[in-house]
Amino acid sequence: MAYNVKTFEDIYNTVMRRIKLPVTDTEALTACKEVINTRYHDVVFKQKWRWRLSHWDLPIPAKYVTGGIAAIQGDREIIGAGTAWTADHKGWWFKADAYDEIYKVIAVNVATQRILLSSVYAGTSLAAGSGYKLFKFQHGLPPDCEELDYVWHDHYRWPMQIVTPRQMIETIANNPDAEGYVAGVTVMGFTAYSGPKLGQFVLGYDFLNDDRENDLELVTFPHVPDETHTLHIIYQKKVGELKNATDEPIMPLEKRQVLVYGALADMFFRERNQDLGQFFEAKFSKMLGDMENDQEFTDERPLLYVPNTWSRGEPPDAASMDLGNMWDRFYSRYKIY
């Protein structure tokens, strides 16, 4: 028995029709929608499904050091000379070469070449032409990203370590001048407000919340990229509740009937029809087992050989590892559907 279902509406209409209850039966329809969502999440979190993965390329811009700056202790504004700051530098971080402290750039006045910091500059006042750097190490994640699976780039071509936020904070604090290609990442949540005290609040620049679509951000280390490069990211997509009639389950179209089987089992058990409930429970279990055993739909982490001679962030030489062939095999195995 197969069902042609695509949307949430297709699923619950099929289930209601099979148990011979009208969709106008509000109580039964509500129960039907609830069991569909329960089965949906049971399936989604049962296995590392390939159809839950997505690929995203994140450009990592090189640090910006053109020109020089002047800064006044206790002021939030940094004045550029010979710089070419753009609106894109908003959200980057500022560091004067003479000090370890870093400050987030919350506004850029392109016409006057001035930037506004998230808090007052605490170092000694600096004369015009002083050295500085702008860099970016916090990046918003795609709206549908729930969890990172693999992160790599062409200068570090196997999945790099994903550390805890605490490890990342400690690493950055202990290595304030670290520069180079990304070697480690973590995921943090955006805070509601991390700007200046209200007495220093600047209308039009400071704000009390974020308007980003995802409340997660990717934080990279080394936090000062010395060259432009691209991070390749495979992540697990968020799975929410099916609510609207046109909502579609994240799983492939040909596998969505598993939700019909599961919901039919639950609804027949609800109607105290044990025979049909057990029948569709068996159908659900059989189809779910077939899905788990199908390598086209599941994903297992590869075992990657890393030579003992490799101890730092740079990749090994060709003599110690056939990196190109290994990566070709890895990427072809983990292509995204």
Image (cartoon, rainbow, N blue to C red):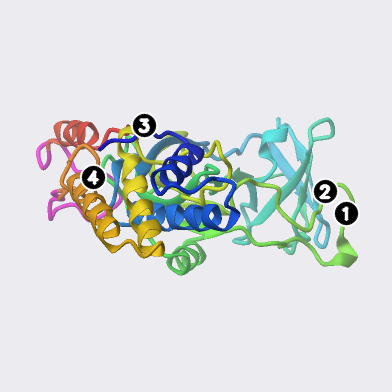
Bounds of the magenta span?
A: 305-321
x and y, in percent, of residue 242 in the image: 51, 48
Image position of 164 with respect to 319: above or below: below
Check disc 4 and give the amino acid type: Thr
Q: Return the mark for residue 202.
A: 1
- Can see residue 127? no
- Mark-to-mark CA distance, 3 and 4: 23 Å
Three-letter code for the amino acid on which mark 2 is drawn: Tyr
Direction from residue 68 to residue 229 in the image, left or right: left
Q: Which x, y percent locates residue 203?
A: 90, 51
* Residue at image location 61% in from the left, 45% down from the top: 133
How far apart in space, not on screen, are marks 1 and 4 (Cα)? 51 Å
Image point (65%, 47%), residue name: 212
Quadrant hosting residue 319: top left
Q: Could you say where residue 44 lies in the image, as x and y percent from the top left?
A: 36, 52
Q: Mark 3 to mark 2: distance in Å?
A: 52 Å
Mark 1: amino acid? Val
Q: Please tell me which residue lies in front, 279 or 327.
A: 279
What residue is disc 4 on? 298
